[in-house]
Amino acid sequence: MPTSSSPVPRLLTAQTGPLLQLEASLLGKAAEIEAWFRTQWQKNAPPFYSSVDLRNAGFKLAPVDTNLFPGGFNNLNPAFEPLCVQALQMAMQRVCPSACDVLLVPENHTRNKFYLENVATLAALIQKAGYRLRIGSLIPDLHEPLELTLEISGRKLLLEPLRRTADRVHVGDFYPCTVLLNNDLSAGVPEILKNIRQDVVPPPDLGWHLRQKSNHFGFYREVAREFGAVAGLDPWLVDPLFRNCGQINFLKREGQECLEANVELLLADIGAKYAEYGIQQEPFVIIKSEAGTYGMGVMTAKSVEDVRNMNRKSRTHMASAKEGREVTGAIIQEGVYTFEKMGEDGATAEPVVYMIDRNVVGGFYRLNSQRGNQENLNAPGMRFEPLAFEEACSSPDHSCGPDERPNRFYAYGVVARLAALAAAREIAAVSEIRAQTAAA
Amino acid sequence: MPTSSSPVPRLLTAQTGPLLQLEASLLGKAAEIEAWFRTQWQKNAPPFYSSVDLRNAGFKLAPVDTNLFPGGFNNLNPAFEPLCVQALQMAMQRVCPSACDVLLVPENHTRNKFYLENVATLAALIQKAGYRLRIGSLIPDLHEPLELTLEISGRKLLLEPLRRTADRVHVGDFYPCTVLLNNDLSAGVPEILKNIRQDVVPPPDLGWHLRQKSNHFGFYREVAREFGAVAGLDPWLVDPLFRNCGQINFLKREGQECLEANVELLLADIGAKYAEYGIQQEPFVIIKSEAGTYGMGVMTAKSVEDVRNMNRKSRTHMASAKEGREVTGAIIQEGVYTFEKMGEDGATAEPVVYMIDRNVVGGFYRLNSQRGNQENLNAPGMRFEPLAFEEACSSPDHSCGPDERPNRFYAYGVVARLAALAAAREIAAVSEIRAQTAAA
């Protein structure tokens, strides 16, 4: 009888070697892990959708970023479409069971041809899930519907100016019951979306104007601790250590002491863990803006000196963030080596896992041949490689039974879902704060 | 902006011609149809799993059989696996949110090599959904675990004798919280499964010992009527007319008058509909045993004479059913021509659609080159052709936009789900009767 378990799609990974111990031990505990996830999702509803950047160091597999407004649906392999559609139906059902009409509110950057492909793909998926969909744009100077022909796919995309009448938003005479944000609200919640009667998912309070990476990873730490008990492993194996500084202004060198002290402490903590596991590599940390997205404001440091000696250019880079917001807080996160390489140029690779509701629906590799295994790959030179389904054993072949090819992607799906679970708790906490504020 | 909608997987069909009017009109109303399905599933939970045999006459697309214990998961394309796994998680969540362990109770026929492949595939899917699974067999003379090596795939299957201790069933020390039936209980609910504390899905009352085709198609008639109002079409276009006879004994020629009268009335009703739509083909009916499965006890008739002149051999065939049960009731169903042909031999083809919970998860064609387009294909000469995903447009290609290839399989997914919805109402009605009986 087959004994392999893989509650996530069987996907190809860049690695082809034997299963690493961590991956094997997660596979071995799959039934317990899945049962635990189920009880967790009953306590906290999963995010509508999410994407998680992972780093696989072999000895350690950890999320380094959790995005609640995923912008790369176009990078998923089209073979995943039915899976996405089914999961979207599940997610929509949770939000508004009677919903028929959905308004998608994307980012404003109409010059990013990749992002526009994402919007078109997401829109098509929601339509295929059986919903009427139109796109309501927040572009300030958009006064008429704008039809774009996408440069890459040639698809057409109709952006309509988002309007508000009383306490409902709409485009033209299309008044949806659900507003789906694919805009991370870095600049804050726009007035037009405040206190509207319609359901807005994800909750606007989860935008990067309020969200903080250290808050997320604080929840993640708890999730990892509980998960460690279920899976019988040291939570550190799936959890990047971190510290944070509340007030940093890189340009003005404000908060420098906090930063240096925390980098030193964190490097020591990582060093202790490396010693415990006999890991020979050099510890490093990643410093990121608390609210940064799109890979902006990220640096690697192996010592306090690296931080002390930051030059003007690096400081400017760290101070910049999406829509020019000044960086006011920083998270110092344990750096996780990635030992995955892919392509003819042996580009450094990190998996990005996509989830809709509780389901892993696909993923891709972020590759960067100009970056090393300790660096942020979300940088110039970045490219994407869709993950394909692992070739299934469709023909009767004794050497290819379902139990003989453990799916190494399973572990990625588990860790990605841990991050989604942390986000679920983050969402619940934010909603509670919001409710208390409203009641006060 | 893409406008096509396909809440079911994009699948290849045997047809390649232009979309027929019915298919096109269902695609055009997809958002309304999907919203309606969602409200329906809130009223009645979908069956755990189901398979529906469809016939596509071009002018008409209708279910002819709805199976609540599907036995062909092995015939699904392995590419559907992730879809099945995700849907199984949804289905299991509904049955027993905290479930970890599942006991699968299959049919007893260990000499049917195809059915054994189905059991192995279903077992693997449930394991991949994150559940521990063992197989509890009802085979009377099985006293020890029996490991079978499957002839076709070479997979191993461990059948363990189903045991009962107090009010719980188990195999060995494996006490599951959920018992999943893949046994249609033609011979009645076995004592060992009566009044057990564990959840049993589908409900044993839905076994063919109690279930009647005419009861199902009575519910289907209601569903089709409501659906017709939503989709703006004559319900007959998706609904096979039927009549039924309560007491028939083909061998003893008992109930012959009822049968002849109903065949005559039904042929006249079909003829009237054909005239209304200007259909030139000759009406025919299918006579089936109320509880028959596996294609046994099925005959085609184009006139009362066909029934009157049944020879001894045909009568014996009609009187036989699975496990030799005497046929006591018959449904006389409008015959639906199938105009689908497939393969080099131009075999007559009918699609079989598989569903788990509310989701269409795949399908296959039942082919029979020895049978005509008015005949039951579930007969000697039958073979299966897995449906593949329609080739997705993965590359930027203007001639291949997502809105330009309407998926003709969508209509099949709609009609199959109508049948699943009828089964959902059937299940709810049976549960209510059971509850009233228990209270009395």
Image: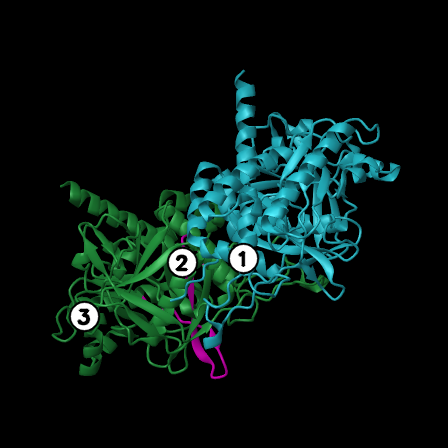
Chain colours: A cyan, B green
Q: Quadrant of the C terminus of chain B?
A: top left
Q: Position of residue A230 (x, y in %)?
A: 45, 45
Q: Which one is in front in this view, the residue at disc 1 or the one at disc 2?
A: 1
Question: Is residue B440 positioned above or below B50 on the image?
Answer: above
Q: Quadrant of residue B423?
A: bottom left
Residue B126, numbered circle: 2
Residue at image coords 55%, 68%: A391
In the image, residue A321 above or below residue B73: above
As shown in the figure, which amino acid type bears the numbered disc 1?
Answer: Gln
Picture quadrant of residue B367: bottom left
Q: State the SS at label 2.
A: helix
Label 2: how many residues lie within 10 Å, few (<14), some (14-19) or many (20+)?
Answer: many
Q: Is residue B298 above or below residue B424?
A: below
Element carrying mark 3: loop
- What label does residue B141 carry, if any? 3
Q: Secondary structure at mark 1?
A: helix
